[in-house]
């Protein structure tokens, strides 16, 4: 499933609503912890694309095709900027600069790759049961970046739908 994003900050809210509306298809409660984390990640990655590139982007959501206990939810945002994502250290008074740090902390995996003249930033959430509680010790997450030519995780068992 994918959504075209215009370079307008109002698109962030539209992207959150769109993502939440797609969750029921794969049996994920739209008000559960997994959904809340996913919607926050959508918000952060789309905000980064809109604010830092000023260009259109494409949001892609890869959800399990049917409810299963073990599956991975993958979120991708592709834009036409060739600037690499750069985590920043925001001070206490800063009103921005924490988006990628949230992705690093909340996603089980994340990365990025160059594509043509742009890039694709992705993150994955492992689905443990229908609506899992966070695993002990997960607060720090597992993060790693991908560079050009880096392979992505397999997407077996995920359904794709162009919207």
Image (cartoon, rainbow, N blue to C red):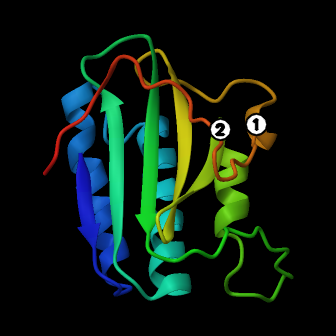
Is the residue marked by circle 2 packed among few (<14), some (14-19), or many (20+) residues within 10 Å?
A: many
Helix, strand or loop under label 2: strand
Question: Outermost residue, top direction?
Answer: 69
Write down the residue under mark 1. 142
- 1 and 2 marks in contact (CB < 8 Å): yes
Helix, strand or loop under label 1: loop
- In the image, residue 149 lies at what x, y percent? 63, 45
Write down the residue under mark 2. 109
* 140 versus 13 height, above or below: above
The structure residue drawn at horizontal position 77% and vertical position 24%, both measured from the top left corner, is 136
Residue nearest the viewer, comparing 35 with 99:
99
Apparent side of residue 59 relative to residue 72 in the rendered image (left or right) = left
* 133 versus 93 height, above or below: above
- In the image, residue 60 lies at what x, y percent? 34, 51
Marks 1 and 2, how far apart in space? Answer: 6 Å
Apparent side of residue 104 relative to residue 41 in the rendered image (left or right) = right
- In the image, residue 1 lies at what x, y percent? 23, 45
- In the image, residue 114 lies at what x, y percent? 57, 59
Mark 1 vs 2, N-terminal side: 2
């Amino acid at each position: 499933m994918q959504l075209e994003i215009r370079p307008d900050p109002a698109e962030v809210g539209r992207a959150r609503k769109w993502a939440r509306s797609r969750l029921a298809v794969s049996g994920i409660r739209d008000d559960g912890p997994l959904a809340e984390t996913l919607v926050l990640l959508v918000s952060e990655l789309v905000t980064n694309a809109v604010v830092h590139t000023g260009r259109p982007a494409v949001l892609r959501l890869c959800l399990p095709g049917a409810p299963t206990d073990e599956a991975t939810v993958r979120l991708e945002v592709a834009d036409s900027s060739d600037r690499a994502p750069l985590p920043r250290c925001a001070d206490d008074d800063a009103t921005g600069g924490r988006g990628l740090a949230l992705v690093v902390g909340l996603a089980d995996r994340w990365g990025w790759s160059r594509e043509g003249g742009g890039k694709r930033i992705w993150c994955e959430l492992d689905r443990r049961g229908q609506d899992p509680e966070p695993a002990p010790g997960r607060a720090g997450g597992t993060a790693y970046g991908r560079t050009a030519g880096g392979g992505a995780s397999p997407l077996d068992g995920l359904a794709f739908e162009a919207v």
